[in-house]
Image (cartoon, rainbow, N blue to C red):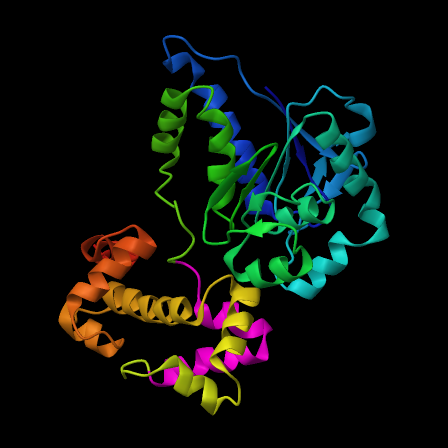
């Protein structure tokens, strides 16, 4: 498989190198397999002959105009821009128009297009994600949804594969993106790579998303999120909060759906699960106590929600606390 990793000045160092290292590890482990696949040919490609990464490292690159059509997959790692305004300015810059045009041409030539984190905005800007499901960094989901209304945004997913395009979520999802091209060729090799690289389970971004951050882009949604947090342990009606905010339940429904792709009730559950997850990972409170603190009358409701919305049991969430916090000095 011939893979072009396309980079721009300011490419995020971790995401870029994570993609390279995953394929390098796969190639290095080929001899461990009884019937290994062909090695992956990976080239770092740019508009010119070199770029500087976000941390200032000079990287030699293969000029895009010289690689011809012999590409199976084009991968766009993240760029080191976290704020949405700066990111939109970058993807819409006339300087990058030649690359966007090349992305469109690659799609016409049946090249599989892939991107992770902020890199997904380049695919969307080129129009190649229209009519397809796609994910992006969880905190950029609302901006992505507003700017690219023809894309079916699923920012809760770590990885999303559609016909001709694969997108991945934030930072560490670059690993999942690269592995998604190794696994169909050799599931055994992909599993071996994950063990050598100690890649964990990140099927969903949902448990990492912070509702307060996601709600910031819309005044009504942000006000609703704050109101819910202020009375998290209480039993309340969404219609009452809507009335306090000077709006109707239907208007609130339209706002949360347009901004976050979810209903007000779903947002309430996400806020409660976020707080419950933090308490499970950082305190020794009982499950009953945590359920009451986040507004559920019993542990059963909390257990069911974690299973349905996170795909994990409460025991698994509690065990997922940052292990380095528990290392004792020797």
Name the one closer to the observer, 303 or 132: 132
Q: How many marks?
A: 0
Name the one closer to the observer, 37 or 304: 304
Residue 140 part of the magenta segment: no
User: Is residue 240 shown left or right of residue 146?
Assistant: left
Regarding residue 286, the answer to whether it shows in the image is no
Residue 78 lies, in percent from the top left, at 61, 47
- Please tell me whether residue 198 is drawn above or below residue 275 in the rendered image: above
Name the one closer to the observer, 32 or 296: 296
The quarter of the rendered structure image containing the C terminus is: bottom left
* Helix, strand or loop: magenta stretch: helix
Residue 88 lies, in percent from the top left, at 72, 59
Q: Residue at image x 61%, y 51%?
A: 118
Residue 70 lies, in percent from the top left, at 72, 19
User: Seen from this angle, which residue lies furthest right?
Assistant: 94
Residue 126 lies, in percent from the top left, at 74, 44
For residue 43, what is the image quadrant?
Answer: top right
The quarter of the rendered structure image containing the N terminus is: top right
User: Is residue 264 shown left or right of residue 198?
Assistant: right
Residue 215 part of the magenta segment: yes
Q: Residue at image x 38%, y 39%?
A: 199
For residue 235, what is the image quadrant?
Answer: bottom left
Regarding residue 282, the answer to whether it shows in the image is yes
Q: Which residues are magenta?
A: 208-231
Name the one closer to the observer, 197 or 34: 34
């Amino acid at each position: 498989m011939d893979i072009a990793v396309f980079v721009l000045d300011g490419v995020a160092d971790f995401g870029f190198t994570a993609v390279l290292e995953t394929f390098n590890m796969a190639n290095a482990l080929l001899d461990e397999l009884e019937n290994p696949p062909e090695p992956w040919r990976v080239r770092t490609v740019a508009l010119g002959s070199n770029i500087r990464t976000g941390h200032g490292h000079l990287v030699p690159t293969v000029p895009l105009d010289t690689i011809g059509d012999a590409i199976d997959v084009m991968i766009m790692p993240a760029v080191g821009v976290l704020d949405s305004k700066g990111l939109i300015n970058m993807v819409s810059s006339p300087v990058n128009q030649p690359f966007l045009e090349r992305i469109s041409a690659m799609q016409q030539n049946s090249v599989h297009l892939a991107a992770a984190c902020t890199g997904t905005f380049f695919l969307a800007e080129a129009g190649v994600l229209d009519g397809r499901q796609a994910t992006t960094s969880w905190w950029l989901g609302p901006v992505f949804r507003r700017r690219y209304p023809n894309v079916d945004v699923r920012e809760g997913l770590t990885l999303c594969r559609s016909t001709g395009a694969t997108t991945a979520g934030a930072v560490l999802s670059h690993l999942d993106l690269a592995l998604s091209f190794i696994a169909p060729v050799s599931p055994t090799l992909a599993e071996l790579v994950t063990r050598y690289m100690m890649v964990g389970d990140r099927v969903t971004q949902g448990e990492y998303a912070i509702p307060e951050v996601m709600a910031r882009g819309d005044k009504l949604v942000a006000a609703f999120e704050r109101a819910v947090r202020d009375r998290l342990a209480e039993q309340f009606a969404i219609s009452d909060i809507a009335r306090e905010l000077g709006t109707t339940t239907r208007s609130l429904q339209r706002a949360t759906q347009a901004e976050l792709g979810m209903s007000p009730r779903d947002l309430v559950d996400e806020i409660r699960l976020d707080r419950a997850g933090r308490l499970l990972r950082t305190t020794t409170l009982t499950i009953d106590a945590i359920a009451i603190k986040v507004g559920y009358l019993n542990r059963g409701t909390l257990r069911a929600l974690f299973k349905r919305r996170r795909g994990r049991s409460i025991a698994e969430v509690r065990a997922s606390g940052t292990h380095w916090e528990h290392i004792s000095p020797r």
